[in-house]
Amino acid sequence: MANDPLSSEQSVQQLFDLSGKNALITGGTGHLGSAMARALAEAGARVVISSRTLGKAQQVADSLAGHQRGNHLAVAIDQLDETSVDLGFKDAVSQVGRLDILVNNGHDPLSADWETVTGEQFQKQLANATGYFLLARHLRDHAVGNKHQASIIMLGSMYGSVGSYPDVYEGICAASPAAYHALKGSVVHLTRHLAVYWAKEKIRVNCLSPGPFPAAKAPRALIERLNAKSPMGRMGMPAELKGAIVFLASDASSYMTGQNLIIDGGWTSW
Ligand SMILES: NC(=O)c1ccc[n+]([C@@H]2O[C@H](COP(=O)([O-])OP(=O)(O)OC[C@H]3O[C@@H](n4cnc5c(N)ncnc54)[C@H](OP(=O)(O)O)[C@@H]3O)[C@@H](O)[C@H]2O)c1
């Protein structure tokens, strides 16, 4: 287990070491979630994968490496359903005893853009933020109740900071949904708010905002247009979030809270 960062200077290896820590990651079955789960496990944490489908989560948990290989766990959580959030969090705690890290990564997708989205679809998309909040509060209550520190990481997006380029999508697919932009902007700001309220309780809350990390099934023509908008001229690979997630989860970021770490190949720096 890493030492208290305030009591003595730790080596860089100690700072990034997650041995002895337990981490819950939602949507750990997905494109980015599975890479971040591998990172947490490889850094030494015992990882609890959540999915809406317990069997899928178990498969990912069984595939993870690190000191805790074979001990990683699975729970079912639908973040749009408050009862499921409550039960899933309780299940995670009952399996590991103590949770130190929460990665709010799951995302219930929406394809309807501003032209076609209904009010109900828009509200449902925003409910992803409600799920992030409810889980974050559970972790805060658990950690404060048991008198230990915790790190919460919210998955934002570059689209929580900047608008999208309409011409990138035109003629290929629906535009980046307005409701997604409202959601991710709110996640970035929710991070700041909770971080301030919980800082003295030693609960850190940070946001990790990926830029473009399209899944393999994304249309080639879209990727080419996105590449042209990227200073690096290419898309991100899921493994390029591994360093950032371990940094935010670990003592390496012990004096950082309320921040939005953007990993986007320079997209928001033009
Ligand atoms: N990929 C990108 O370019 C990009 C860019 C910026 C930000 N992000 C953010 O990064 C995060 C991960 O994105 P991704 O690309 O890895 O997406 P993804 O592959 O679609 O994974 C999202 C995961 O969320 C889970 N999920 C869906 N509905 C859910 C619900 N109602 N409750 C709980 N979990 C639910 C799914 O797991 P189950 O089906 O197993 O439940 C899925 O594995 C998201 O928050 C996304 O907004 C992604």
Image: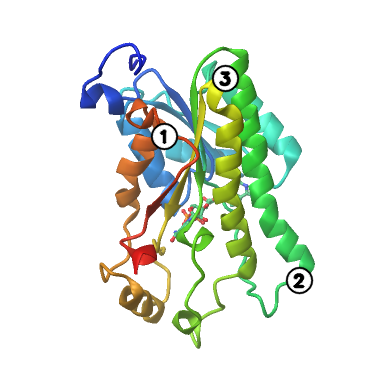
**Most foreground residue, 179 or 197:** 197
Instruction: Point out residue 188 in the picture as x, y percentages from the top left corner.
Output: 54, 50
Instruction: Point out residue 40 in the picture as x, y percentages from the top left corner.
Output: 37, 34
Image quarter hosting the N terminus = top left
Q: State left or right for residue 249 relative to residue 193.
A: left
- For the residue marked with disc 3, what is the amino acid? Ala
Q: Nearer the viewer, mark 2 or mark 1?
A: 1
Would residue 80 be visible to someone looking at this image?
yes
Tell me the SS state at disc 3.
helix
Residue of label 1: 256
Residue of label 3: 143
Q: Residues within 10 Å of mark 1 (few under 14, many from 20)?
A: some
The label on residue 268 is none
Image quarter hosting the C terminus = bottom left
Q: Residues within 10 Å of mark 2 (few under 14, many from 20)?
A: few
- Based on the displayed image, in which of its 4 quarters is residue 122 positioned? bottom right
Instruction: Point out residue 92 in the picture as x, y percentages from the top left corner.
Output: 58, 26
Q: State left or right for residue 41 relative to residue 124.
A: left
Tell me the SS state at disc 1.
loop
Say whether disc 1 or disc 3 marks the residue closer to the N-terminus: 3
Residue of label 2: 118
Using the numbered discs, state the Cα–Cα distance from disc 2 to disc 3 in whole angstroms: 39 Å
**Residue at far right of view:** 120
Would residue 79 be visible to someone looking at this image?
no
